[in-house]
Image: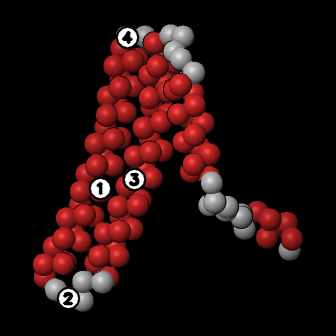
Amino acid sequence: MDILKDLLVNKAYAAGTLSDILSDKVGALNSGFNTKEDFVGKIVDLAVPLGIACAVLLLGYGGYLLISSQGNPDKLQDARSVITNAIIGLLVVLLCVAILLLVSRSLELNIYE
């Protein structure tokens, strides 16, 4: 039973996790760039977690606005626009990363191979 519990239950410690990830990425950006691959790789490594974190925060804020609107059509519209813009922003970040990776592969920079 303990083995099943260990496999199914994972502890998540939210305190400092995102800040640790982003501080490592920003610290890597400050360390300098040796090659083009380092530059593109570090930008991608920083943009994806930051974009996802911002989208999650905005989706949470939009959900809060949606719940607290109490049926007011203006507040509902504001909440829907925040949620829509968060999703569009996340898609823009992901598409930019995809385009950056596509361009880097066409230039044979070999970022993630």
Q: Which of marks 1 and 2 is nearer the N terminus?
A: 2
Q: Where is residue 6 in the image (x, y as percent from the top left)?
A: 80, 65
Label 4: few (<14), some (14–19) or many (≥20) C-alpha neighbours in 10 Å: few
Q: Which residue appears at 51% of the width and 15% of the height?
A: 33
Q: Which residue is label 3 attached to?
A: 54
Q: Nearer the viewer, residue 112 or 59?
A: 59
Amino acid of disc 1: Ile
Q: Which of marks 3 and 4 is nearer the N terminus?
A: 3
> Residue at label 1?
87
**Residue at position x 57%, y 40% in the image:** 23
Q: Give the Cα separation between the discs numbered 1 and 4.
A: 30 Å
Image marks 3 and 4: residues in contact by CB distance under 8 Å: no
Which mark, by number, is residue 71? 2
Task: Give percent across and percent down for residue 32.
Answer: 53, 17
Q: Is residue 110 visible?
A: no
Compared to residue 76, the image places residue 11 above or below, namely above
- SS of the residue at dot 3? helix
N-term-proximal mark, 3 vs 2: 3
Q: Which amino acid does label 4 sit on?
A: Leu
Label 2 amino acid?
Gly
Q: Is mark 4 on a helix, strand or loop?
A: loop
User: Are circles 1 and 2 on residues that touch, CB within 8 Å?
Assistant: no
- Circle 2 SS class: loop
For image coordinates 57% across by 27% down, the residue present is 28
Report the residue marked by disc 4.
107
Outermost residue to the bottom: 70
